[in-house]
Image (cartoon, rainbow, N blue to C red):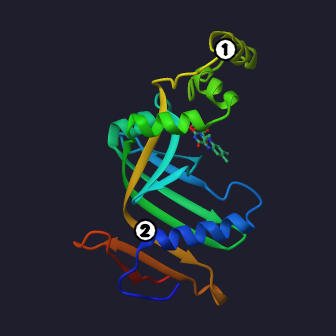
Amino acid sequence: MELEEIVDPIPLFKQWLSEAEKKEIRDPNAMQLATVSKNGMPSVRTVLLKDIIDYDFVFYTNYESRKSNEINETGKGAICFYWKSLNRQVRLIGNITKVAEEISDKYYRSRSRGSRIGAWASQQSRELESRDILMEKVKLMETKYTDDIPRPSHWGGYALSPIEFEFWQDGDFRLHDRFILKPTKIKNQWIAKRYYP
Ligand SMILES: Cc1cc2nc3c(=O)[nH]c(=O)nc-3n(C[C@H](O)[C@H](O)[C@H](O)COP(=O)(O)O)c2cc1C
């Protein structure tokens, strides 16, 4: 990346993601999502980036999961992408809100039947006594929904609206390039500054 005063992070992110899509062996859209409880205890897990709407990073999950409980409590999160094949990292922090119902509906409809059934059958992040119980629930849902499967109200999308980006590119002799981008007062204008690696 060139050092420029004004950089739009989204085209740059999309360029890095498309380069990762060509090189990563799987899931170039996998990202580590950190959330935090009201007591300040963080937790982190991998989710898949499914869309970028304007500046928002969208992922889908169970609205009753641990991450969702923490998002309900604090509304804040952090995302980290690491592409081993490129030795690049992108980090974001921001506020997380639910996406509009229609956006979740549209994405839910695009999923395979198995995934749609799975969203009904899984009580994500809650204790499961045996695998058989989950399989029973899957069977039950398959008989209940033979035709159209509506989106469960406990499943949908969230959008993280970034307030800061960091782009990190591996360099020789551990002199990595590291830029932090923060929004200016002008809409869609972000200022990039180089930081010590
Ligand atoms: C490659 C990969 C992709 C994943 N994608 C998602 C996802 O998009 N949404 C999701 O809810 N869980 C996804 N998971 C599972 C989560 O990492 C996690 O186990 C689950 O969401 C429960 O997290 P929680 O209890 O902290 O809420 C993925 C796991 C892996 C390894």
Figure check: 43 above or below 62: below
Residue nearest the viewer, comparing 159 with 80: 159
In the image, residue 46 above or below residue 178: above
| Residue 101: % across, % down | 40, 34
- The quadrant in which residue 3 appears is bottom left
> Which label sits in the foreground, 1 or 2?
1
Q: Going from the N terminus, do you reach mark 1 or mark 2 first?
A: 1
The amino acid on which the numbered mark 2 sits, given as a three-letter code, is Phe
Instruction: Please state if 86 lies on the left or on the right of 152 as rendered.
Output: right
Give the SS element for disc 2: strand
Q: Residues at badges 1 and 2 in contact (C-beta under 8 Å)?
A: no
Name the quadrant where ligand 1 sits.
top right
Residue, x 66% and y 59% (percent of image)?
28
> Residue 112 location in percent, x, y?
67, 33
| Disc on res. 165 | 2
Q: Residue 29 versus residue 175: which sits nearer the camera? A: 29
Which labelled disc corresponds to residue 146? 1
**Kind of residue at badge 1:** Thr
Would you say 156 lies left or right of 169 here?
left
